[in-house]
Amino acid sequence: MKQFWRWNCMFSLAIWLSFCILLNACGIKAALDFKPNIVLMLADDLGIGDLGCYGNNTIRTPNIDRLAKEGVKLTQHIAAASLCTPSRAAFLTGRYPIRSGMASSNSYRALQWNAGSGGLPNNETTFARLLQQQGYTTGLIGKWHQGVNCDYGNDYCHHPLNHGFDYFYGMPFTLLNNCQDNKPPELDAAFQAKLWFYTQLIGLAVFSVLTGKITGLISVPWKVILCFSLFGFLFFASWYSSYGFVKHWNCIMMRNFSITEQPMKLERTTSIMLQEALSFIQQNKQGPFLLFVSFLHVHTPLFTTKRFLGKSKHGLYGDNVEEMDWVVGQILDAIDKQGLKNSTFTYFASDHGGHLEAQDGTIQLGGWNGIYKDSENPGGS
Ligand SMILES: *[C@@H]1O[C@H](CO)[C@@H](O)[C@H](O)[C@H]1NC(C)=O
Ligand SMILES: *[C@@H]1O[C@H](CO)[C@@H](O)[C@H](O)[C@H]1NC(C)=O
Ligand SMILES: *[C@@H]1O[C@H](CO)[C@@H](O)[C@H](O)[C@H]1NC(C)=O
Ligand SMILES: *[C@@H]1O[C@H](CO)[C@@H](O)[C@H](O)[C@H]1NC(C)=O
């Protein structure tokens, strides 16, 4: 039996070998050397149940549906994690996020601060790096969320340009509620609320004791009051220094290593990103190129331009999905117009499922996962 298996194995090897020689001889090697352009589009927190091609009959996603109709629609295409940072680390490297240190079991599974020193390690190999080595021009437009610096504010050790991308325009971090005024803060929300609660509590205590002292109702030494005030001030200072500048430090746009907007202006982000994508295609039409469009859609705060605002049947969330679909259409049209359709591999996916818990009272702000159960963890991104 063993012998038979070995012979069988050698036989197949021989067939493969002759096949390879034949291919080379027939010049098919040239065909195998063909380098298609690659356009990847990744949505943020989009649920599988939000798209027409997966059975949604109330949200209009004609462009993504067209992509599915003209190509292949995958139904067993699983994300490696239910949260951005680890799932994107896996997407970029093809490795389980735990292998690159990008997974964790608590709510800090996602990078929570732009200025944090964590991120995708240098020794990980992204598909962008592999394609770069194959002569591709590689561009990332949109969200990164894999870290920026290690030890200094300008070492850029985790930056896209140090992970195989020739060009980067977008958010080094992730979109979040804090990027829009008058939205409930999202970053580190539970801890922030706790810190603010204790700050207020101590403030109230100091105020009451001070009032008591001044009116002569209670007798406490000034030293004790001073001590308490200092304590309260420290709480306030740590709250304010951590959460008073969230938008300023995290909601920024960069071109390569330079910051172009700080804080970013949400009302023009979509149009600039689209322009960047279109001009990348135009400039690199000679190919081969990799364009990774990493959408800020459909993450909260769901900032949507006037053209799509109030137009869908599913509130702000639906508006935002429909706007994203329109952008997808513009990119597909550009590929068509440049005559690149037959030589471009185009792929659309979500980084993982919808953020079911994202709600404002009874209004649903997160996506719909169709037949699939569960969601991101609260505080996800
Ligand atoms: C379509 O998407 C919306 C928004 O996520 C969702 O509420 C609705 O249930 C979906 N419809 C179907 C048929 O899945
Ligand atoms: C990168 O380095 C870390 C730490 O030394 C190691 O755990 C990890 O396996 C390395 N990754 C690769 C792809 O070699
Ligand atoms: C971005 O950086 C790449 C190389 O690192 C360079 O080729 C390109 O010109 C830069 N683009 C801009 C707009 O600075
Ligand atoms: C693309 O391929 C299709 C099908 O093979 C063909 O009909 C069409 O003419 C091709 N288009 C271009 C621009 O090469």
Image: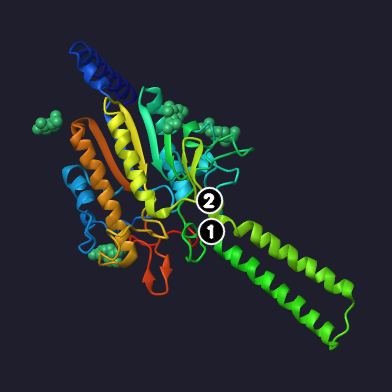
Reading the chain from its start, which is encountered first: label 2 or label 1?
1
Q: Quadrant of ligand 3?
A: top left
- Residue at image mark 1: 187
User: What colour scheme was applied to this rendering of the protein?
Assistant: rainbow
Helix, strand or loop at label 2? It is: helix
Residue at 35%, 26% in the rendered image: 136
Q: Is residue 152 above or below residue 113?
A: above
Left or right of residue 343: residue 315: right
- Residue sitting at the far top: 25
> For disc 1, does the CB lie below 8 Å from ligand 1?
no
Quarter occupied by residue 376:
bottom left
Q: Are marks 2 and 1 in contact (CB under 8 Å)?
A: yes
Across and down, in percent, residue 189 comes to 55, 63
Q: Is residue 257 visible?
A: yes
Left or right of residue 335: residue 142: right
Residue at 76%, 81% in the rendered image: 208
Q: Which mark is residue 250?
A: 2
Residue at 71%, 64% in the rendered image: 235
Of residue 357 and residue 101, the one placed in the foreground of this image is 357
Q: Is residue 44 above or below residue 366?
A: above
Across and down, in percent, residue 79 comes to 38, 48
Helix, strand or loop at label 1? It is: loop
Left or right of residue 178: residue 48: left
